[in-house]
Image (cartoon, coloured by chain):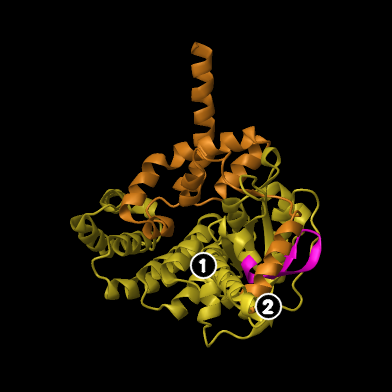
Amino acid sequence: MTARRSPTGRSARLAAGVFVCALAAGCASFFPQTVALRDARPADLPQRAEIAGTPFFPQEDYQCGPAALATLLVHSGAKVTPAQLVPEVYLPERQGSLQVEMLAAARRHGRVSYVLAPQLEDLLRELASGNPVIVLQNQGLGPFEKWHYAVAFGYDLEAGELVLRSATTERQVLPFPVHEYVWKKSGYWAMVALPPDRIAATAAEARWLAALASLERTGDPRIARTGYETFLKRWPENVGGAIGLANAHYALGELAQAEGVLRDAARREPGSVVVLNNLAQTLSDLGRNDEALALIERAVAAGGPFAPAARETRDLILSRKSSPGRSGQK
Amino acid sequence: MNSAMTRTICHVLIVLMAWMPVHFAQAGIISTDQVVASAAQAERAAVLGLVSRSDIAGQLQALGLDPQTAKDRVAALSDDEVRSLAGKLDALPAGADGSALVVLILIGVLVWYFFFRK
């Protein structure tokens, strides 16, 4: 009897082994980031984190966009309710909210909105730094799509779990594989929204600058100024950041400060048409058209995509020189 | 056909006029937005920027927004974001309600116990 059972047992074990291997291989392709994190845990990532005091707004029908956004904004100190955000992000005919409008609405409330790199590790690093993260999930199966925004606010590496505020659930605990499965279909889309005096834990220099430029474009220049000052403390060599700070000063009428920032930038990058152009415009506004003209001639001579703008500035300076009464201070 | 064309032209002009103050507020200064975009993108933005913004505002109206709200919401978008919407408003994900996680959680928990925890 035992003699007969042994080979059967062995082949059963073999079959089971093959099945487990196939399952593991299959799973690895289903949850690549979970597997990568399990196999190589970053040493500097805390074992667990949970952001205390993360607000909770149980959503009404279809309105997880406004609710998720309100969670981030209120956590960052803004005074806003999901109801106030509905007209800013909700699209009635789609019965939902678009990703770019989530980003834009956060900026309308003076926050830097930033899309994270599509990595589970980056998501966890933001949580460890105290920044709640909106994730876009697709909870549908197969061809059925069911898009949903949830707010991650904690995790436990040992247990392999993410903690979220989701719809009417105040504390949803999702195992990493489940989270990755629903998150993957959105291309691992995740965003943070931070006040301008902070920088996301996983921020990349160029993309953070772009986020600030978008904020500056529509927002209050004082907020943009704070954003660029913070940016330049972290990346002091970045000429784009200096241009942004100078533009914010200029928009606020702080021409002397704008000049100072641009002169610094011009020392570091003497050939930048944008720096020369904006410095010339600023000096001309200060009534120093001769200095301005010398600079703008250099900008025009340098050429490039901003040459037409530089030529316009030169025309303006020349016209101000020829009728000095109209340019004001001299 | 003539009146349809007139209407289209009026529509475009109204939207263009609505955008004027935003785009020409600082004549001589080159904006940070332009600097951040690469040179090629900046050129494309100059050509496509205004037109696609008015298009998107119109499409948002068709999806249930009033004209003023649609205009405000497009104004809050960056040029890149506007381009990302062009022609895709009906297809892009729109996050809405969430439930139906039950089956997934069951599958997930099984996988997790047998796999992640080893």
**Quarter of the image where one finds residue A148:** bottom right
- Figure quadrant of the C terminus of chain A: bottom left
Q: Which chain is orange?
A: B
Instruction: Name the secondary structure under disc 2.
Output: loop
Q: Which mark is residue A10?
A: none
Residue at 53% in and 16% down: B4
| Coordinates of residue A212 in the picture (x, y in percent) | 50, 64
Q: Looking at numbered disc 1 in the image, what kind of residue is underneath it? A: Ala
Q: Residues within 10 Å of mark 1 (few under 14, many from 20)?
A: few
Residue B5 can be seen in this image: yes
Apparent side of residue A263 relative to residue B72 in the rendered image (left or right): left
Q: Give the left or right position of residue A244, taking residue A39 as reference.
A: left
The residue to which callout 1 is attached is A25
Most extreme residue toward the left is A301
Numbered mark located on residue A1 in the image? 2
- Residue depicted at x 53% and y 87%: A44
**Chain of the residue under label 2:** A
The letter of the yellow chain is A
User: Within the magenta stretch, is there residue A129?
Assistant: no
Residue A282, compared with residue A197, is above or below; it is above
Give the image quarter of residue A69: bottom right
Query: Which amino acid, mark 2?
Result: Met
Comparing labels 2 and 1, the label whose residue is closer to the camera: 2
The magenta stretch is A164-177
Asked if residue A77 shows in the view, the reply is no
Q: Position of residue A272 (x, y in %)?
A: 27, 64
Mark 2 closeness class: few <14, some 14–19, many ≥20 residues within 10 Å: few
